Image (spheres, helix red, strand yellow):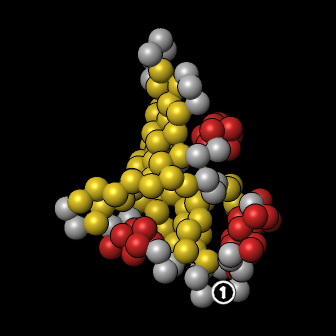
């Protein structure tokens, strides 16, 4: 999982796919964190992406560094603990202008039953589960 985290941090932007009814939705994200041995992302509860995740927690993200790409699929689980939110915000201080660990909007979610696949045009895919 550490390799997945470091790759996502290096890329800066990754793309998260959810479903809205029968329509796929993809949008850029940049938040990623490891807290208590789990890979987390962050969003706002008022956003459509949050509502889509609560309806169907199966998601996939994709990132590309110019040579290799990473796909992570799994289920996202909301963690409402202040400590998880604080950890995310400490790792991404720019978010503090929009979010607080104690507001009703900040949402952190961790991957459960995740499969990460690193791929390239030259190497065999490498799979990590967590």
Classify residue 34 as left or right of residue 74.
Answer: right
Q: Is residue 59 above or below residue 80?
A: above
How many numbered callouts? 1
**Residue at the image position 51 percent from the left and 57 percent from the top:** 111
Q: Quadrant of the N terminus?
A: top right
Which percent across, then down, holds residue 103? 66, 87
The residue indicated by pointer 1 is: 103
**Residue at the image position 41 percent from the left and 72 percent from the top:** 48
Instruction: Identify the residue at the far top of this view.
Output: 122
In front here: 109 or 27?
27
| Corner quadrant of residue 95 | bottom right
Q: Is residue 122 above or below residue 33?
A: above
**Residue at the image position 36 percent from the left and 70 percent from the top:** 52
| Corner quadrant of residue 96 | bottom right
Which percent across, then down, holds residue 34? 68, 55
Instruction: Identify the residue at the far left of this view.
Output: 22
**Residue at the image position 47 percent from the left and 42 percent from the top:** 62
Q: Is residue 39 visible?
A: no
**Neighbours of disc 1 within 10 Å: few (<14), some (14-19), many (20+):** few
Which percent across, then down, holds residue 68? 53, 25
Disc 1 on helix, strand or loop?
A: loop
| Corner quadrant of residue 55 | bottom left
Instruction: Identify the residue at the far front of this view.
Output: 97
Which percent across, then down, holds residue 36? 70, 61
Classify residue 26 as left or right of residue 116.
Answer: left
Q: Is residue 110 visible?
A: yes
């Amino acid at each position: 999982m550490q390799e997945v985290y470091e790759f996502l941090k290096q890329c800066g932007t990754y793309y998260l796919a959810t479903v809205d009814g029968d329509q796929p939705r993809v949008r850029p994200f940049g938040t990623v964190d490891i807290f208590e041995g789990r890979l987390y992302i962050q969003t706002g509860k008022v956003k459509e992406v949050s509502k889509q995740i609560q309806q169907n927690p199966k998601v996939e993200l994709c990132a590309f560094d110019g040579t290799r790409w990473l796909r992570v699929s799994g289920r996202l689980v909301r963690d409402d603990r202040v400590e998880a939110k604080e950890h995310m915000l400490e790792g991404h201080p720019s978010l503090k202008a929009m979010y607080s660990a104690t507001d009703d909007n900040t949402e952190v979610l961790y991957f459960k039953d995740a499969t990460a696949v690193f791929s390239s045009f030259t190497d065999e895919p490498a799979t990590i589960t967590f």
